[in-house]
Amino acid sequence: MLDKVFDSPSAALADLVEAGITVAVGGFGLCGIPEQLITALRDTGVRDLVAVSNNAGVDDWGLGLLLKTRQIRKMVSSYVGENAEFERQFMAGELEVEFNPQGTLAERMRAGGAGIPAFFTKTGVGTLVAEGKETRDFDGETYVMERGIRADLSLVKAWKADRSGNLVFRRTARNFNPMVAACGKHTVVEVEELVEIGQLDPDGIHTPGVYVDRIVVTGSEKRIEQRTVRPG
């Protein structure tokens, strides 16, 4: 069986990264992001990236690291409200942004992973989201066509994996990660725990190993995006 386990994030990304590629990244806010793979991608120095992710992290963590070093040319996102550097670059015309409704973005990646080139949705009809896109009527309702997303490289964070790449996500970290894992031509996953084949309950596997090319075990740095407390 092909050994999918690599010693480090940088080794797992070796020969998969080049200028101008489209990179899909899992996570929601700072929850379930492949933080060590993002850092390794930054350290390659590769530029002109198109990043597909629900959001852009914060200024000093997640995809904010790649924005800080100006390695991202374009963001395909649905929410970017926590990143001041993203806002600055966008308002200055230094960063191209393609906004998507959140459900549409998720479905675009799911469709790409399923081999579906396009689909129709009612979300965004009659708004800026639909400008320049094909529309069609079904049963008296107007729908807008959205293209599936197929990334050159997908970066994913999972809780557990076995050596064949079967993945289990933990709670909220099971957000965009399954769709990101499926839509990449090459998918690299960082996990907190690696187990032997046969140790995962087949009914509890969220993403089958057929979608996964490389695995690296990392320590997770669980930062809090916005800390909110109440008086005791």
Image (cartoon, rainbow, N blue to C red):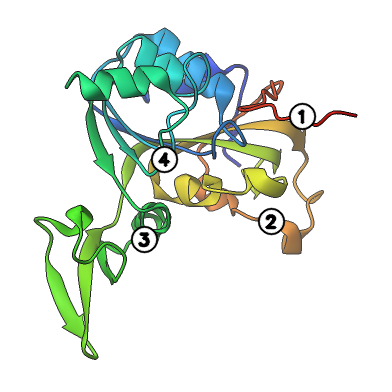
Residues at marks 4 and 2, CA–CA distance in whole angstroms: 28 Å
Q: Are marks 4 and 2 in contact (CB under 8 Å)?
A: no
Q: Which residue is mark 4?
A: 79
x then y, percent, for residue 230? 80, 31
Mark 4: amino acid: Tyr
Q: Residues within 10 Å of mark 1 (few under 14, many from 20)?
A: few
Q: Is residue 201 above or below residue 55?
A: below
**Cα distance in 3D space between marks 3 and 2:** 20 Å
Q: Earlier in the sequence, mark 4 or mark 2?
A: 4
Camera-side mark, 3 or 1:
1
Q: Residue 8 in the image: x percent, y percent?
A: 59, 16
Q: What's the distance in space between the residues labelled 3 and 1, CA to CA?
A: 39 Å
**Inter-mark Cα distance, 3 to 4:** 20 Å
Q: Quadrant of residue 64?
A: top left
**Residue topped by disc 2:** 205
Q: Secondary structure at mark 4?
A: loop
- The amino acid type of the residue labelled 3 equals Ala
Q: Residue at x 69, y 20 (%)?
A: 221
Going by the numbered disc 1, the residue's amino acid type is Val
Question: Which structural element holds mark 1?
Answer: loop
For marks 1 and 2, give the CA distance: 35 Å
Residue at the spot of label 1: 229
Q: Amino acid at mark 2?
A: Ile
Quarter occupied by the C terminus: top right
Q: Earlier in the sequence, mark 3 or mark 4?
A: 4
Q: Residue at label 3?
A: 111
In the picture provided, is 2 more to the left or to the right than 97?
A: right
How crowded pointer 4 is (Cα within 10 Å; few <14, some 14-19, many 20+) is rated as some
